[in-house]
Image (cartoon, helix red, strand yellow):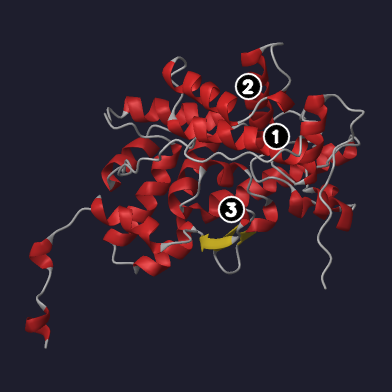
Amino acid sequence: MEKSRKKFRPDPALKLMDQVRQVLRYHHYRYRTERAYCDWIIRYIEYYGCQKHPREMGKTEIEFFLSHLASDQKVSASARRQALNAIVFFYTHVLDIPVDIGHVRAKKYKRPPVVMTKTEVRQVFARMEGIHLLMAKVLYGCGLRLMECIRLRIRDIDFGQNLVYIRDARGGKDRVTVFPESVREDMRLRVETVKKIHDEDLDQGFGSVYLPDALSRKYPNASHEFRWQYVFPAKKLSTDPRSGRHHVLESGLQKAVKTAVDRAGIAKHATCHTFRHSFATHMLENGVNIRIVQELMGHADVKTTEIYIHVMEKDISVVSSPLDVL
């Protein structure tokens, strides 16, 4: 009979939030998720002050806290879901107290995605330059999420097969997507620039980059290898305790895209993620099979991809009846 896996217990000698961080890192949560979860847990605890210890609270207190976020703080449904996930993680994995959330979760409303036309995409690109323009083209040309682009590493760009590998994407899945020929030369120059930066870091005794715990243990010297460096590294060495030179902050690209959209006079609420929506929609408009688009987007269910059918431009005048092609 297979032995049940022993549940990880945090060090009781640590302070409560240090225990939270210890458990999050044991489960290999991303650094951004760690910060977000810790923030929500702290806000939950501070909401009740010194009235009760978290061990003395449960579903009722969680419901009141989420109600406070919704009615008083006007927090979005997606943020409330993240807050609930953080609190449930806190009780389940840190305090070892099961929580029956029942109907507590905020309902997720599906809205049609905002999509730019091909002309609008060109207008936005025309008002961007430098590294931000290249990153925006990668978002649109590969159908990437913002952080997937930010976290690209040198080894993820396959110039030989014209492919881009997305590692550990949403849901912990890997996928492969297209590598646009139009950015090939710019990406080649980008790789050369990163190589110079990396060589200079090595000469100064730095040159390391953050790797997930499992990889850093299996390949202890990999953090200094060029292939693991970020395609878009930060200008300065990171203060992040888990890396030497981190990737760029997403806020820079977000601001550049917003500025370009405003200057182009586009009234839509177009963001970095809009490029991904536009990628899928324009693929379908170009006649690419929806199953291929599903794979490129990394959707587990084709129903997720089908949402783009509702926003794509359609010209039924060019569609032939099946009777006419018999």
Mark 2 touches mark 1? (CB < 8 Å)? yes
Tags 3 and 2 touching, CB below 8 Å? no
- Residue at image mark 3: 171
Characterize the local packing of mark 1: few (<14), some (14-19) or many (20 or more) Cα atoms within 10 angstroms: many
Q: Indicate the quadrant containing the N terminus: top left, top right, bottom left or bottom right.
A: bottom right
Closer to the chain start, of discs 3 and 2, is 2
Q: Residue visible at 55% across and 49% down?
A: 186
| Disc number for residue 39 | none
Q: Nearer the viewer, residue 244 or 17?
A: 17
- Where residue 115 sits, quadrant-wise, is top left
Residue 261: in sight, yes or no?
yes
Decide: is 281 above or below 255: below
**Which residue lies under the disc numbered 2?**
44
Between discs 1 and 3, the one toward the N terminus: 1
Q: CA distance from mark 3 to mark 2?
A: 26 Å
Residue type at the position of mark 2 = Tyr
Q: Nearer the viewer, residue 33 or 288?
A: 33
Secondary structure found at label 1: helix
Mark 3 nearby-residue class (10 Å; few <14, some 14–19, many ≥20):
few
Give how far across and how far down residue 306 sits, in percent. Answer: 32, 58
The amino acid type found where label 1 is placed reads Phe
